[in-house]
Image: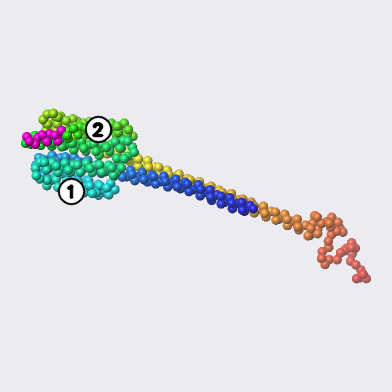
Amino acid sequence: MNSRRTRLRSALAVVLTVLVLLPAAGLFLRVLQENSKQRDTVQLEQDGVEYLTALGPLITALAESQSSALQGVAAEPASVTAAVARVQSVDDRVGDQLGTRTRWTDLKDKISKLPKATGGEEKVFTAHVEAADLTLELFEAVRANSALKRDPDADISLLQDVVAEQAPTAVTAVSRMSDLANRAAGARRALRPALTVQFGYQAQKANEIVSELTDTLQEAVDDTKSNTLSGNLVSNLDSFRRGIEAANRGANLGGAPDVSTLVTAQSTLQTALSALSGVILKEIAALLDDRSDSLTYRRIEAFALFGVAIALIVVATLWTRGRARDARTGSTEQSGESGRDVSVQVSGPAGGNGPGSPYNGSPYGSVPNYGEAPNYGGGRERSGALR
């Protein structure tokens, strides 16, 4: 009966262990999968930041190339060659993950053909506009495919808007403003109205995008978790604004553009963009590093908690088995003691002189041993006559 009860307890212990272990393992795997998914997303965003870091110098180099080409310089500027090499290096490493390989190949081919563009200012200008537009599309593809555009944190989402869309668009617009003003100044009277319209469109676009950029940065500063973003942005944003203000003065909307002022503003703006983009990208990288560290800590924490759960289950199992073993041992000892008591009670009557024997306590009641003659004469032997 006790053995059956012990086996039942052991079976129940095994069942309870399984019922506790399976949900714990399922919860651990779910947490681990979600953690791994978030870590992969962070790594993809970090790849996007690396790609955007290489694209920033390319957009300013193309603006320089456009201006020099319109001035009759056919050779590719050194800044373009260096920027293309940097983007190619990054695309070789992370292009497959970001889905940029085809776009970059087409853009690189378009850039390589810029020095060969002929047919007058219009065709040269159009070729550079197409290359710049493809570059802006590559910016958009990187921030979309790297998940930066969908980042859950407001500060990262806002900062990537600035560095991947608004700032490159603003610099491109100012570059076109400057070159269109220069072309209009030397163009025939019949071509000036069309060039002036294009110039006005680019000037309006630059002002609108810079206003959006300023508002976006202010919102990012208000929502950020970084302690350094506000201080790092102030000086660089001021330089960027001064470049835009100089471009507006040179544009002189409603009057004749000041080409020299626009050229100076373009150079100032490109320098300011490089500094501003560098600060923003470093801030994004730091925020992503903090998130990656947090996810790593959570991963270690999940493993530790699961290990503790397993250890507790093992201890509980061993304790239950120990109790069951002790119960079986106690049952066996009780059975042995019961058997010894029965044997003592049986051996008493069989001996004849035990405590319950009727012969006990009487000299006449002793039972002679087998083969021994009883001595009735007080110890004297019988006489020979009697024998």
- Tell me if 381 is positioned left or right of 45 in this view: right
| Residue 385 to residue 342: above or below | below
| Residue 339 to residue 124: above or below | below
Q: Which residue is mark 2?
A: 212
Q: Residues within 10 Å of mark 2 (few under 14, many from 20)?
A: some
- Looking at the image, is mark 1 or mark 2 earlier in the sequence? 1
Element carrying mark 1: helix
User: Residue drawn at (36%, 43%), measured in percent from left and top?
Assistant: 38
Amino acid type of the residue tagged 1 in the rendering: Asp
User: Residue drawn at (21%, 49%), measured in percent from left and top?
Assistant: 105
The magenta stretch spans which residues? Answer: 189-200
Q: Is residue 196 magenta?
A: yes
Out of 37 and 129, give the one closest to the viewer.
129
Residue 124's tag is: none
Q: Is residue 316 magenta?
A: no
Q: Which residue is mark 1?
A: 109
Q: At which x and y percent is residue 203?
A: 17, 33
| Residue 134 visible somewhere in the drawing | yes
Q: At which x and y percent is residue 113?
A: 14, 47
- Tell me if 103 is positioned left or right of 383 in this view: left
Which image quarter: residue 240?
top left
Q: At which x and y percent is residue 346?
A: 75, 57
| Residue 344 to residue 37: above or below | below
| Residue 279 visible somewhere in the drawing | no
